[in-house]
Structure formats: structure tokens, C-alpha cells
Image (tube, coloured by chain):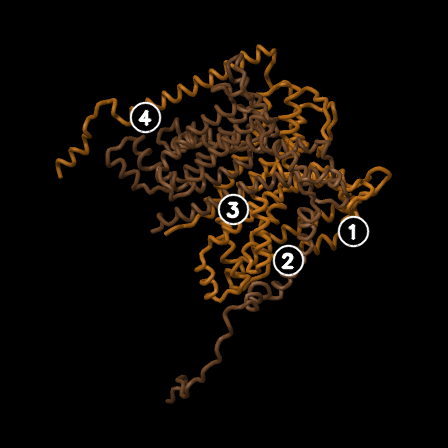
Amino acid sequence: MAISYVRTEIQQAQPAPQRASGIALWLRRNLFSTPTDTVLTLLGIAFLLWAVPPLFGFLFGNAVFPGGTVEQCRDPGAGACWAYIGDRVNFFIYGFYPIDQYWRPNLVFALAALLLVPLAIPKVPFKVINAILFLVVLPVVTYVLLAGGSFGLRPVPTEQWGGLLVTLIISSVAIIGSLPLGVLLALGRQSKLPVIRTLCISFIELWRAVPLITVLFMASIMLPLFLPQGTSIDKLLRALVGVTLFASAYMAEVIRGGLQAIPRGQYEAASALGLGYWRRMGFIVLPQALKHVIPGIVNNFISLFKDTSLVSIVGIFDLLNTIQAATSDTNWFSPTQAVTGYIFAALIYWVFCFSMSRYSMFMERRLNTGHKR
Amino acid sequence: MASMDTARQAPPRTFFLNDPVLRGVFYQIVVGLLVVLFLLWIINNTAINLQAQNKTSGFDFLWKTSGFDISFSLFHWDRTSYYWEAFLVGLTNTLLVAVIGIVLATLLGFTLGIARLSSNFIIARLATVYIELIRNIPLLLQLFFWYFAVLKAMPAVRNSLEFPFDIFINQRGMFLPRPLPDEQFVFVVVAFFLTIAVAIGLRIWARRRLDETGHRFPVLLVSLALLVAIPGLVWIVSGADVPFDPPVLQRFNFAGGVQLPPEFVALAFGLVIYTAAFIAETVRAGILAVSHGQTEAAQSLGLKESDRLRLVIVPQAMRVIVPPLTSQYLNLTKNSSLGAAIGYPELVNVFAGTSLNQTGRAIEIIAMTMAVYLTFSLLTSLIMNWYNARVALVER
């Protein structure tokens, strides 16, 4: 019986495969692989052609740059009125802070940057000292510097603080204050003691269920009612309390994620060493859990940073509120005044949030390596 | 061995202060007492403060006439309406914008999430730019932008932007044709619901046939076709008149049709644009979470592309997508409270804003408002727990 499926003659060499790289191939693969793909590509290109040139013209081509006049902005064909931003930028950054005292917020910005940069770079040593300086010392220094009243500094009431300064203060205070609270709440939620667990769960779930704006309303209307008669409490402080409590509930959930990611063996090993609850948590579990959730904390900070814009509803002059208030500036009245202000605010928020989200992704990639088995 | 057994029966006695159980009870009593004392202190302070301000408390204000106007309401509202009606108006307006927002944001979000994973370079990049741009800008700023910079800058009524199907957009909002159900139209509605029943029956039959014979039946396509065809036929048979009242431009404003106020349009638009970016990320993460081995296994079973997606990838991706998706829905509902900042009369604006200012019953009103959101949240997590229990992986 002949074996028909065995090849009897030598196979001829096939032609070399087509080039596996090159622009034409890339185009075919990524833009024109199927008819649907081609249609989508054409639609996308049409959209870009429709949207990008007018946008570019508005932002740059026809825009009035700093140094321009309001008459140029009122021109019918004029684009964004950057001259208006250039004129009012100090208001957007410092609010009503006295102009001759601008060095104080500037010093705070510089100190914060000086401490934050080495803290954020994983390779730089002295993390603990750095963290204590940033989380404990800096807030005190900031308060002394900004509020004044001591060391011969002129007092500046918080009503005069504003703009980006207040946005940064609220988000930093909320995140710094919510960290210890969040740790306690997360530990309480994991606790075996029913009373403590129930209290922590109700606190966390109540705060997470309601929108921040009702929390802010509550803080600004009801906080004065809750305190003993005669205590007057600063408007900014009320918002700070509200935002911090709100943030701590979210922080607790992030940290709980970290606690749950720690293998049981770590808890048991710590117990086997004879450590008590607080030492077990403080030396063994929390250091690992917190390191694990740095990306989550940064993500939390991003949404908190965006949420601080809500304090403008209860009348605090944060970045968004200064922008909104400046739109009624009649000196710069022009059709594009409001839009330009919003674009400027969006740019600032975007730069902060986007860089933080990139940092969180970078940390995520860095932290992943140690825990893969 | 014997010594070990006795050791287990009688644990070594420790000094009672070191007994973890006793300590636990002690700590709980201390914390509980502290919390109760703190609450009593707050209640006491509040009572003193209220007395000092000559304010009364209680829920009797709900049955008083409100005396303010609400610009947009789904049912009748005038100045003689009661405060509890204001509460209802706020609640329904919140629900209205939330439901419309959820539906549209889901559609847009799924499209964007899939587009971001597309092999098409331009489409994927466009979706990425959209998501990264929108996610990193505060919602309130976006709402201000849509409301003050876009809708307020729309042309006046005379030069309204005109869209197909008699839809107009101008400074005063959006004008849509109003469906006018006449007497014959009832039959169309009845036919519609009957068709839905038929479609469900069809699905059951198709499933049974699949189990018995292995033949598949295109249930979805046929059902959709039936849903369009049968009510359409009934409509044509019953006279085929156009039961729509289109908005018509009069001297100063549009008459007829439905007017959606600019606040509603801006809020719904802003919420959809913003939430869609988050939903898109959820969808993308869900699809990426299905391991590539699943795709390869489906391919080696000989499933074609559409079946592979529908029967293998999507059901597994949905398990990952649905929990964060519902929390996005909840976020959207909570975020609709930002409508207060642009004057949309939702719960926070009408009730926690105007009503609170007029009655001064801060505690009652804030408590009711928070209770509403708490109910939404608890309902959502109940549904979520049920869903998670249903789709949970049965692990080996």
C-alpha cells in the first residue's frame, strides 16, 4: 500500500516574506485593515480636520496675548483673550491676599515644592524625616506664615485668602488630615469588636453615600449649631472640617483595600512574635499596606483636588470661584472673557490632576514588581 | 499526648487584665460611652443654640405653603404648594436627570471604552484624548462651561439652531416635539407591550431549542425587528396620524412642544460627558481583565468573531465591569446635586437650598436630603450584592 501522504519531492523555496515593518504596512495594519476600519479612519480624519483648525485658531492664531488690549478682545474675530488672564492672574493665584504680602504664599509654595519633590522620588533617602517635615511641620509653618499675627507678621484673615492658594490648602489639609483618620477607620472596620466595627462602618458608609455638596452645606450651616454657644468658627475652617471628614471615609476604603491585600500569614507571624495589636499593626501590617495603596491614595487625592472646586458653592474663593467672579469684571468685558477664564482654570486643574495620575501609574508599576510571585 | 490534651482542656490562667476578651469588652464600652457622650454634647449644644435663636424644630413645616417659584417641574407647582411638594419636585427632578444621564452616559461610555481598545490608531487616540481630558477637569468647572459659556452664548430665540425632527436649541434651552397620544395611540402602546411579552417567550423557546437540538436562533435581531414592525403596523392600521406637537416659532418664543430649560440641558450634558469618561475606563479595564487565553480557546473551538465576543468575552468582562459601573451610576446621581450651582431645581437646590433658607429648619432638611442619598446608596449596594452573588465565579 503506497503511503500517499508522504511527500516525495523536495519543496521549492518560498519567496521571502514581505517586509514586517515600514510605513505602508503600519498604515495598512492600523488604519485600513478592513472596510469598516477604513470608514472609521476617514471619519476620524474628517473630525480632526473639522475640529482642530478652529480650536487652534481660537487658542493661538486669533488669540489676544498678554500685552493686548480689551479692544482687541472685543474684535468680532478674536479668539481667546489671554491678555485678560495675564492681567488678573494674581487674583486667580492669591485671591484677595494683600499684594505686598505675596512673598508669604510664595514662600509656602516654595517650601512645599522643596519637600514634596524628594518625597515623591523613590530613590531619595531620609523618607521618614521628609514625611514628618511635610506632613506635620509644613502645615504649622504654612498656617503661621499665611495667617500671620505672630513673629511680626501682619495678620491676614482667611476671608482674604483665595484662588489656587486656597484650592491647594484645602486639598492638602484634607488629604493630610484624612490619612490618620482613614487609617483608624479602616482598622476599625476590620476590627473583631462589634461596637467599634459597626461605628466605623456606619461612619464610612454614611459619608460615602451623600454628595460632598450636602456635606459642605451641613458643615457651613450645622457645625455652628453643634458647637457650644458663642464659639465662632471660621468659614474656611468649616469647609476644611467637612472636606476632611468626607475624604477620610474614602481614604478608609482605600486603606482597607491595602489591609485586605496583606496575606494572613503576616498577621499570624506578627502575633506569633508576641506583638500586641498596635505593634502588630504599626510595625508589620500598616507599613506594607500603606506602601501597597500609594497609587490609590494618589488617585483619591486627584478626585479630592477636583472636588475642592465645590467649596465655591458655599462661598469660599477657591480657584474656580475667583475665575467665576472675575467673569463679571467689566474692564475686560468681551465675548470670549468667560470661555478664556474657564479654559485657564481647566488647564491648571488638568496639569495638576494629569501629572498626579501619571505619578500614580508610575508608582503602581514600581510597586507591582515586589509582590509578583 | 496526654499532657497536650490536658493543656488544651485547661488553658493557662492569665491575669484578668490581660484577657483579650475582657479587654475587648472594656474598649467597646469606653468607645461606646465616648460616642454617646459626644452625641449628647452635640444635641445639648444644638438645643441651646436653637433656643437662643428662637427657632422651633419638627417636621410640621412640610405642610406649610412654600411661596416660591420653581422653574422646572414634572408636575403642577405654584407658590401655594407645600414644602413636601417641593421635596417631591426636587426628588423627581434629581431622578429625571439621573435616569437620562445614566442611559446616555452608558451608551457613550461603552462606545468610548471599546474605541480606546480599537486597533484603529486614530479612533483609539481620539478616545484616549477625550478620556484623559475630561477625567482630569472638575465636573463643576465643566458644568459652568456648558451653562455659562456654551448655552448662555447660544443664539437668541429668533436664530435658534435647528436640528432634524423639529429639535431646536437656543438661549432658553432645548425644544422638542411633544408626543400627543390620541385615542388610537393606546393600541400602539398595547401592541408594544404585547410584543415585549412575545420576545420574552421567543427567548425562552430559543433557549430550549438550543439545549435540545443545538440550533441557534437569532433572538435579538428578530425581537428588535418585531418591536419595530408590530407597533408600527398597528399604528398604520389605526390611522397613522402623526401624534406629535412640534415646537413652532411664535413672535417671542416657541409655542407647543416640550421645553427643556438650559439648566437641565447643561447639567445632563455635563454629567453624561463626565461620567462617560469614567465608564469608558471601567469598560476598558473589564475587557482587558479577560485573559487572552479565553480568546485563544474560543478561536480554537472555531467560534467566529461575533460569537467569540458575545458568548465568551463579554459575559466574563461584564462580571468585572458591572460593580464599578453601578458605583459610577451612583456617582452620577450624587453629582447631579451640582445642578444647584447652575440653578437646576434638583433636591439640593430646591429643598436643601431654598426651602432651608425660608424655613430655617436646617437639621430636619439636611437629614431628609442625606436620607434620600443614603437610600439610593443602600439600594444600589443591595442590588450589587445580589448581582455579585449571582455571577460570582464558582472556584475549584
Which one is in front in this view, the residue at disc 2 or the one at disc 1?
2
Badge 1 marks a residue whose secondary structure is loop
Q: Position of residue A55 (x, y in %)?
A: 67, 49
**Circle 3 crowding by C-alpha within 10 Å: few under 14, some 14–19, many from 20:** some
Q: Amino acid at mark 3?
A: Val
Gap in angstroms between the C-alphas marked 4 and 3: 39 Å
Q: Position of residue A30 (x, y in %)?
A: 56, 63
Q: Earlier in the sequence, mark 1 or mark 4?
A: 4
Q: Amino acid at mark 1?
A: Ser
Which one is in front in this view, the residue at disc 1 or the one at disc 3?
3
Gap in angstroms between the C-alphas marked 2 and 4: 64 Å
Which residue does the numbered mark 3 point to in the structure image?
Answer: B322
Gap in angstroms between the C-alphas marked 1 and 3: 42 Å
Q: Amino acid at mark 4?
A: Gly
Q: Amino acid at mark 2?
A: Gly
Query: Front-most of B140 and B183?
Result: B140
Parent chain of label 3: B
Badge 3 marks a residue whose secondary structure is helix
Parent chain of label 2: A
User: Which of the labelled discs sits on residue B190, or is there none?
Assistant: none
Report if residue A206 is visible in the image: no
Query: Front-most of B269 and B381?
Result: B269
**Circle 4 crowding by C-alpha within 10 Å: few under 14, some 14–19, many from 20:** some
Parent chain of label 1: B
Which residue does the numbered mark 4 point to in the structure image?
Answer: B24
Establish if B306 lies above or below B265: below
Specify the colour of chain A.
brown
Q: Are marks 1 and 4 in contact (CB under 8 Å)?
A: no
Q: Earlier in the sequence, mark 1 or mark 3?
A: 1
User: Which of the labelled discs sits on residue A44, or is there none?
Assistant: 2
Q: Position of residue B43 (x, y in %)?
A: 50, 16
Which residue does the numbered mark 1 point to in the structure image?
Answer: B238
